[in-house]
Image: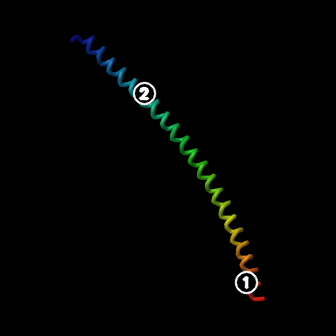
Amino acid sequence: MGILDQETDSLAGLEDRIQKAVQLVTRLRQEKEAALKDAADAHAQTAKLAHELESLQAERKQVRGRIEKLLGHIDHLGTS
């Protein structure tokens, strides 16, 4: 094998490694974008669920007050 053949093989090996590195970087960028989108979706879902929880807690408080009021009326009827 001559020097020219060795250089050609070295150049081909380097070219192959560069192509693999480019493919890896491209794949990692795609994975990063997908991860960022997933994180944004999760954040939006968390905000939505937090709002829903607040609404349910307010509704529960309102229902509790109404029930306590009704029980007060029932107690008042029992003492009359």
Q: Residue placed farthest to the right in the image? A: 80
Nearer to the camera, 50 or 30: 50
User: Vertical placement of 53 versus 26: above or below?
Assistant: below
For the residues marked 1 and 2, what is the alpha-carbon distance in whole angstroms? 76 Å
Question: In x, y percent, where is residue 26?
Answer: 46, 30
Q: Residue at position x 44%, y 31% from top?
A: 25
Mark with earlier residue (1, 2): 2
User: Vertical placement of 42 versus 22: above or below?
Assistant: below
Q: Which residue is mark 1?
A: 75
Q: Could you say which disc has been placed on residue 38 in the image?
A: none
Nearer to the camera, 50 or 18: 50
Tag 1: Cα neighbours inside 10 Å, few (<14), some, or many (≥20)?
few
Secondary-structure class at tag 1: helix
Q: Residue at position x 24%, y 12% from top?
A: 3
Question: In x, y percent, where is residue 9?
Answer: 29, 16
Q: Quadrant of the N terminus?
A: top left
Question: In x, y percent, where is residue 7?
Answer: 29, 15
Nearer to the camera, 15 or 51: 51
User: Which quadrant holds residue 70?
Assistant: bottom right
Q: Which residue is mark 2?
A: 23
